Image (cartoon, helix red, strand yellow):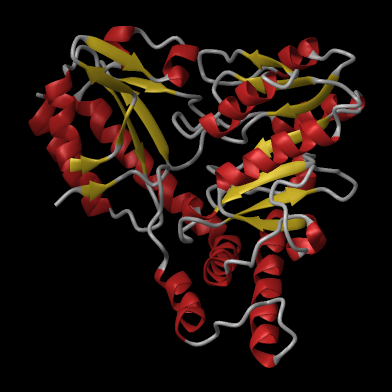
Amino acid sequence: MSIYLDYNATTPIDPRVAKAMVPFLEEHFGNPSSAHSFGVTARKAVNKSREQVANLIGCATSELIFTSGGTESNNHALRGYAFANKNKGNHIITSTIEHPAILNVCDYLEKYGFEVTKIPVDSFGMVDPSDVEGAITPQTILISIMHANNEIGTIQPIRRISEIAHNNNIAVHCDAAQSLGKIHVNVNELGVDLLSIAGHKLYAPKGVGALFIRDGIILEKFMIGANQESARRAGTENILEIVGLGKAAEIAQAEIKQNMDHQKEMRDLLWKGIKHNFPDVKLNGHPVERLPNTLNISFPNLDEYVMLDVFTEIAASAGAACHSDDISISPVLEAIGVPLDYARGTIRFSTGRFTTKEEIDQTIEKLIGIIK
């Protein structure tokens, strides 16, 4: 049976989250827009969940809407802000290591007359705020930089970037799908105007997310229809999963310190064991400013068959995909300059709430057996 060390890809649903959802699967089926008791029960559940998520990120409940996930939140933030504010300018700044849910949206916006500057990163995957400042033009209306990278875990200097942006009357969006629940995330401390949340990275179900929209920020509607979500996101609310996201946020807020400590302990134990047995292994990402659960490493000169054996035994993620004689390297690894002979042997391990020491010990043993 494989050991699960791919929590950055998705998390299992916390049993406490599943338990909170059950009544809305079996009993409370009302439409939140209905005035009768069934609708009132559903509406109260949505309001409670909104408060739970808002408390986690430090915003007002009126500044939060529920979405179908991180991709929709990113789309709504970028497309919504760009089209609603195109009278102010047409320039957007992002980085080269953003998730495709950002980069592909930027490519889409370029087809509609927007210009996009993609800031490079250093060898640790860190954006230099001075590069962001240097890319600003009179036409810049939005800066979108992720809080933490999903592949290498590097945490970006969002607060400093926000200060630069606001000094130039520019809005800031932050994709926090990977950071929320792993490290402290507060929209006011970060200074951002828009922040995206993905439920399935937070021990909630897949198919639910949220978007923080700071009071005063205007977005073009992403979903058009009735007046749900304060007339900002049409469609009958997904009560079942919204309840799950709310409970997951409540747990994350209450247990953030112990979860950070546990995930870091498991990650560092794994790194110590691997480094001891494979001295030539390379650590990717910032050594300190990195998510406490993320370990992205590269083994030199591993062929694709060895990598396939690794992923048969251990649920983790690869940094390269091999197709016949062609090797496709992750854009993130390319951006930080990982050499090809290392990049093809890259594995991302990501620990989680349920990772055990026994699983870490078994992972080290399996790697020794497969690679050596």
Residue 259 x/y as whole percent:
48, 55
Where does the image place residue 303, in percent across and percent down from the top left?
A: 16, 17
Across and down, in percent, residue 60 comes to 81, 60
Work out whether residue 60 can be spotted. Answer: no
Which residue lies at the image location 12% right of the left edge and 32% below the top edge? 309
Q: Can residue 70 be seen in this view?
A: yes
Which residue is outermost to the bottom?
Answer: 37
30 vs 317: above or below:
below
On screen, 127 above or below 261?
above
Q: Which residue is drawn at 39% across and 47% down?
A: 7
* Quarter assignment of residue 146: top right
Q: Which of 162 and 20 is in front in this view?
A: 20
- Left or right, 249 with respect to 225, comes to left
Quadrant of the snapshot with the C terminus: top left
Relative depth, front residue between 254 and 74: 74
Out of 155 and 136, give the one closest to the viewer: 136
Please report the residue visible at 60 percent of the width from the left and 31 percent of the height from the top. 102
Left or right relative to 43: residue 142: right
303 shown above or below 314 = above
Quadrant for residue 159, please give it: top right
